[in-house]
Image: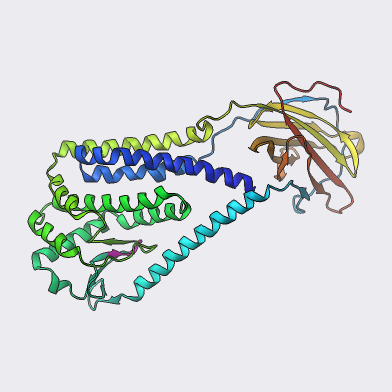
Amino acid sequence: MAEAWLQTIGSQVQVFTLAVVLVALIRLPVRYAFGAQAAYLMWSVVPVLCAAALMPVPQALSVAKTLNLGVVQAWPVLLVGPQPAMAVVGAPWWVAVLLSFWLTGVLAVLAALTMGHARLLRGLTREPGLDAWRMPAGLSPALIGVWRPRLALPADFAARFTVAERSAILRHEAAHKTRHDNRWNLLAHVLLVLFWFHPLAWWALRRHRADQELACDAAVLGGDNAPAAPVYAQALLKAQHLGAAMATWGSASNWRSTHPLLERIAMLKSHRLSPLRRRAGLVLAATLALGALGAGPALQASPPDAPKPQNVMVYLTLEQDGKPLSKPRLFGGLGQAMALRWQTDATAGWPERWELRLNTTQVGEGRLQFDTRLSRGDPLQAMVQPRLIATAGEPARFEVRSEDGRHTLSITLMARLADQPDMRRAP
């Protein structure tokens, strides 16, 4: 299990890196060609591609060729209730160390964001008669909250800005609310928590926020009854010496951003783009997001430089009450779902239909994972679904017991990678 988690994290790091590098390469050309809104929407590729890469790849179940099976003797009815005893070979110690290191960082960043959000809330007071918060003087106006965001204004807001500038700032924060930017900020912080060790995660968060502010500027200046660009620029100049509310789990969208001031003012003319170019940018962003959604499973199924699929030979030993019943063998592709079915002997008084489904995958150098499901009855009903990990050539075993505890069914699995089935006579 630990190795599977580590493998998933490693795969996600590769996908996240690919997505961020892709956005980093196209965001500036897209901004100048199609506007700030299209460039901001490019960031949706990152979470979409990461989520799509986790989607399971459908696998068709096939009944594998069974060697030396024969008829298996009957045993008493087994219960779903009692959990099977499971012998699983443990993962290497360094896997647990790496997972612990990653989890420690996750908890540390999560705690820092949570404490920052608590400090932010302690500095707010409710504005009487308004659906807004009051914050200490010297801070930038901000929209705080995710599901019910509220405007937070500094105590010196009226004294610092003119009426026209205050109107421009309020329209900017209203645009943040309309566009649900704080929810996107929350998603960006979730990715930061998961990839806290990745330098690109911290860079991407800053660039995401900067592009968000440019897109919001363009939305305000490109809308109806837009404020004059000189008034907007003057408000930006006055806000540069203000402190910014910390972006936390509460997600604060600030009037003052970390984006370079000169570049932000220079981009104020982007709202003059033609409607055709704006729509083309939106179509491009949607196309890339859909492409990322479709490419995710492909990345998972065929990672870069992945070796060609191998076949696996699985040796099973079925025992009842410590006595061997049968030693069937299965042969199929690595990662291919296989099924072993048999009918117990009616002469023993317990005729029953059984099925063992098995999927063997490689989870490390020389290590194999068995995902199994044991079912019985007609129709078949799943009893237990143990997952076992063992070194290739070494056995892994699980047991199920009867209701009265008098009888035990044991299934031992041992597998080796092989190009051809083992046709030798079973010992």
Horizontal side, residue 339 vs residue 137: left or right: right
* Residue 116 vertical position relative to residue 283 in the rendered view, above or below: below
Instruction: Compare residues 85 and 355 and report the one nearer the observer.
Output: 85
Is residue 323 visible in the rendered image? The answer is yes
Instruction: Please state, as top left, top right, bottom left or bottom right, where the C terminus lies in the image.
Output: top right
The figure's colour scheme reads rainbow
The answer to if 145 sits in the magenta stretch is: yes
- Which residue is painted at 17% across and 62% down in the image? 169
Specify the segment rendered in magenta: 143-148
Horizontal side, residue 46 vs residue 359: left or right: left
Dominant SS in magenta: loop
Q: Indicate the position of residue 353 as horizontal and vertical percent values.
A: 78, 36
- Which residue is painted at 69% across and 37% down in the image? 368
- Which residue is painted at 35% across and 55% down in the image? 185
The number of callouts visible is: 0
In terms of image quadrants, where is residue 369? top right
* Residue 196 vertical position relative to residue 13 in the rendered view, above or below: below
* Residue 135 vertical position relative to residue 207 in the rendered view, above or below: below
Instruction: Compare residues 74 and 213 and report the one nearer the observer.
Output: 213
In terms of image quadrants, where is residue 410? top right
Is residue 223 visible in the rendered image? The answer is no
Q: Indicate the position of residue 374 as horizontal and vertical percent values.
A: 73, 41
The answer to if 354 sits in the magenta stretch is: no
Horizontal side, residue 423 vs residue 127: left or right: right
Q: Indicate the position of residue 420 as horizontal and vertical percent values.
A: 72, 20
